[in-house]
């Protein structure tokens, strides 16, 4: 499963992580609230979607106290009632495939904003399914081994023993792939073995990647990603831009 190893490049496109931390925590909080609403429980043991979001939040270094406060808020009457999940698909510069997952309390506002971003910096929004056919939904766990704390063979065996579908090493980064249904069990097993994650979430993984040749296309793609990341309604952005 070559190609997904974009961890360091992805970090670069996100800009200064500290500056975006508060925004990230806000989005994660919203995602937890909706997970509680749709799953009917604030207990991750009884709500697999919530368990997935909490794993993602912990990998993003969201403090446990913050998570606890969000879950208490989510248990309150009416919490999350106004949010709905909407996915948009479209094309970036030179037809780069882009999927945007949003959580919004105003469908019209979000649709208008998405259309504006894609028209200004890309090739426009498309119909549902226009690009998602070229992505696979997978659990993706990233372990950063920059400090050399882990042995590659040991991590691979632990991951496969935990039920992972695939393992890939790219320099000092280990990538573990799971079936979405196995994600929570795999991350729990690895956590119990003492592993910490640089990232852990359900992702839309591109089947193929596309390079951008012109400086203008690269600049516009970066602007499109920045605009989407800064939008409070946007939860996740998936694309097949090859940044190597």
Image: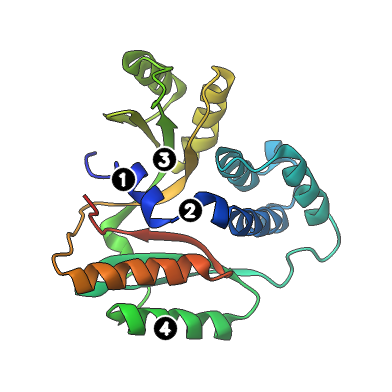
Q: Upstream in the sequence, badge 1 or badge 3?
A: 1
Label of residue 16 in the image: 2
Q: Upstream in the sequence, badge 2 or badge 3?
A: 2
The answer to whether residue 12 is seen in the rendering is yes
Q: Upstream in the sequence, badge 1 or badge 2?
A: 1
Work out how far the residue at label 1 is from the one at label 2, CA to CA, in angstroms. 17 Å
Work out how far the residue at label 1 is from the one at label 3, CA to CA, in angstroms. 12 Å
| Helix, strand or loop under label 4 | helix
- Which residue is drawn at the image coordinates 43% and 17% (left, top)? 149
**Do the CB atoms of the residues marked 1 and 2 lie less than 8 Å apart?**
no
* Placement of 105 over or under 4, stated as above or below: below
The answer to whether residue 126 is seen in the rendering is no
Q: Quadrant of residue 239?
A: bottom left
Work out how far the residue at label 2 is from the one at label 4, CA to CA, in angstroms. 27 Å
* Placement of 91 over or under 207, stated as above or below: below
Label of residue 140 in the image: 3
**Do the CB atoms of the residues marked 1 and 3 lie less than 8 Å apart?**
no
Label 2 vs label 3, nearer the camera: 2
- The residue labelled by disc 4 is 115
Q: Residue furthest left?
A: 213
Q: Upstream in the sequence, badge 4 or badge 1?
A: 1
Dot 1, how many residues are within 10 Å of its Cα: few (below 14), some (14-19), or many (20+)?
A: some
- Which residue is drawn at the image coordinates 38% and 59% (left, top)? 238
- Which residue is drawn at the image coordinates 33% and 66% (left, top)? 222
Q: Upstream in the sequence, badge 2 or badge 4?
A: 2
- Which residue is drawn at the image coordinates 55% and 38% (left, top)? 59
Work out how far the residue at label 2 is from the one at label 3, CA to CA, in angstroms. 23 Å
Give the total of numbered labels: 4
Dot 4, how many residues are within 10 Å of its Cα: few (below 14), some (14-19), or many (20+)?
A: some
The image position of residue 207, as x and y in percent, is 24, 51
- The residue labelled by disc 1 is 6
**Do the CB atoms of the residues marked 3 and 4 lie less than 8 Å apart?**
no
């Amino acid at each position: 499963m070559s190609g997904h190893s974009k961890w360091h490049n992805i970090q670069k496109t996100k800009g200064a992580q500290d500056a975006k931390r508060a925004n990230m925590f806000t989005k994660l909080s919203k995602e937890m609230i909706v997970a509680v609403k749709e799953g009917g429980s604030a207990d991750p043991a009884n709500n697999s979607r919530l368990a997935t979001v909490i794993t993602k939040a912990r990998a993003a270094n969201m403090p446990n106290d913050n998570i606890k406060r969000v879950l208490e808020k989510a248990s309150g009457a009416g919490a999350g009632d106004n949010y709905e999940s909407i996915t948009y698909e479209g094309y970036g510069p030179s037809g780069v495939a882009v999927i945007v997952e949003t959580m919004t309390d105003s469908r019209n506002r979000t649709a208008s904003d998405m259309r504006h971003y894609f028209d200004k910096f890309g090739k426009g929004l498309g119909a549902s399914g226009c690009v998602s056919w070229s992505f696979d939904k997978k659990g993706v766990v990233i372990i950063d081994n920059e400090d050399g704390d882990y042995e590659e063979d040991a991590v691979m065996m632990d991951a496969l023993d935990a039920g992972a579908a695939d393992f890939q090493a790219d320099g000092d980064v280990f990538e573990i792939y799971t079936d979405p249904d196995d994600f929570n069990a795999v991350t729990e097993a690895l956590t119990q073995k003492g592993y910490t994650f640089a990232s852990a979430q359900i992702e839309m993984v591109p089947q193929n990647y596309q390079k951008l040749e012109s400086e203008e296309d690269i600049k516009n793609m970066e602007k499109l990603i920045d605009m989407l990341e800064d939008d409070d309604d946007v939860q996740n952005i998936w694309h097949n831009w090859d940044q190597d």
